Every structure is written in C-alpha cells, then in structure tokens.
Image (cartoon, helix red, strand yellow):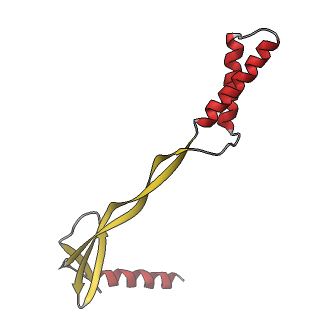
C-alpha cells in the first residue's frame, strides 16, 4: 500500500512538471446575463365580493368601540347606537377593499463575461467578472 501511494505521488508530481502553460489570445467575449421577473403592483379597482373578512370584523369592532367610548345614547338607545356603529364600521371597512393586480416586467442583470479562445481547433472558454486578453492553456 505504501509503495502504491509513493507511485501515485511521483506520477502526479512528474505529470505537473512536464506540463506546458502558455497564453492564448481571446478571440470571442460574450456577456452573460440573468433574466428575472419584476412584479409591479397596482390597484384594479374596488373589490365587489361581499365576504366577511378580517377587515370587516375589525371595522365592526372599531365602530362599536367608538360608540362605547363616546357614550352615545342611554339604555336601549345605547345598544342600538352600538349596533349602528358596528354596522357602519364594518360597512366602511368592507367598502374600502381594493383589488391589487400585478404587471410583470422582465429585467436583465449582468452576471459575467465568457472569454473564449481557440487552440489546435478546440474552443476553450472561461467565465470571469472581467474581460480577458489571454487564456492560459495547460498542455500535458
């Protein structure tokens, strides 16, 4: 086992010693972009559904709370005022709903450059965040 590891180490060392490295001029540079969607919200108009949502419930509670705090009416009149205040608050909250629609737009973001060169009829490329004049080729 020890001899095998020694052989592998010597082989790897010798192969890197005989490797030639030389620059090859870049002949083609391509800009690489990433495309993504951007969602832009806008109001489509009032919502026409008569559902009883959280906003309606909060408006109802606020309407009752305002009447209770101000102290409108006395006896059964106070109860009627609370009911009317709750209905008014709920109605205002429900009618203030709007539909939100979204338009989409495509945006492009620069990512990197693909620098390519030809050596012995083979196209070799590397990606970098800058334009290169040369690519280093390693010949074994």
Residue 70 locus on image (x, y percent): 67, 11
The quarter in which the N terminus is drawn is: bottom right
Q: Is residue 134 above or below residue 58?
A: below
Q: Is residue 33 above or below residue 41?
A: below
The reply, left or right, for residue 128 in relation to residue 44 is left
Residue 36 locus on image (x, y percent): 41, 61
Q: Tell me what residue is drawn at x 21 percent, y 69 percent.
A: 132
**Is residue 27 in view from this perspective?**
yes
Residue 97 locus on image (x, y percent): 58, 39
Front residue (pair 53, 5): 53
Front residue (pair 21, 97): 97
Q: Is residue 102 above or below residue 69?
A: below
Q: Tell me what residue is drawn at x 48 percent, y 81 percent.
A: 5
Spot the residue most to the right: 76
Q: Is residue 89 above or below residue 130?
A: above
Q: Tell me what residue is drawn at x 46 percent, y 47 percent.
A: 42
The reply, left or right, for residue 74 in relation to residue 88 is right
Count the numbered circles shown: 0
Residue 119 locus on image (x, y percent): 23, 86
The quarter in which the C terminus is drawn is: bottom left
The quadrant holding residue 89 is top right
The quadrant holding residue 65 is top right
Front residue (pair 47, 103): 47
Spot the residue most to the bottom: 121
Front residue (pair 33, 63): 63
The reply, left or right, for residue 30 in relation to residue 106 is left
**Is residue 18 in view from this perspective?**
no
């Amino acid at each position: 086992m020890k001899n095998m590891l020694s052989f592998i180490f010597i082989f790897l060392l010798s192969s890197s010693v005989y490797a030639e490295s030389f620059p090859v001029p870049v002949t083609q540079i391509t800009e690489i972009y990433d495309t993504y969607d951007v969602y832009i919200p806008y109001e489509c108009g009032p919502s026409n559904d008569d559902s009883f949502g959280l906003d309606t419930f909060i408006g109802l509670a606020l309407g009752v709370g305002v009447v209770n705090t101000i102290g409108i009416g006395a006896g059964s009149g106070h109860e009627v005022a609370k009911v009317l205040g709750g209905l008014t608050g709920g109605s205002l909250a429900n009618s203030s709903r709007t539909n939100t629609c979204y338009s989409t737009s495509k945006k492009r973001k620069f990512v990197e450059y693909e620098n390519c060169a030809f050596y012995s009829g083979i196209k070799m490329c590397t990606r970098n965040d800058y334009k290169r004049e040369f690519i280093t080729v390693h010949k074994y």
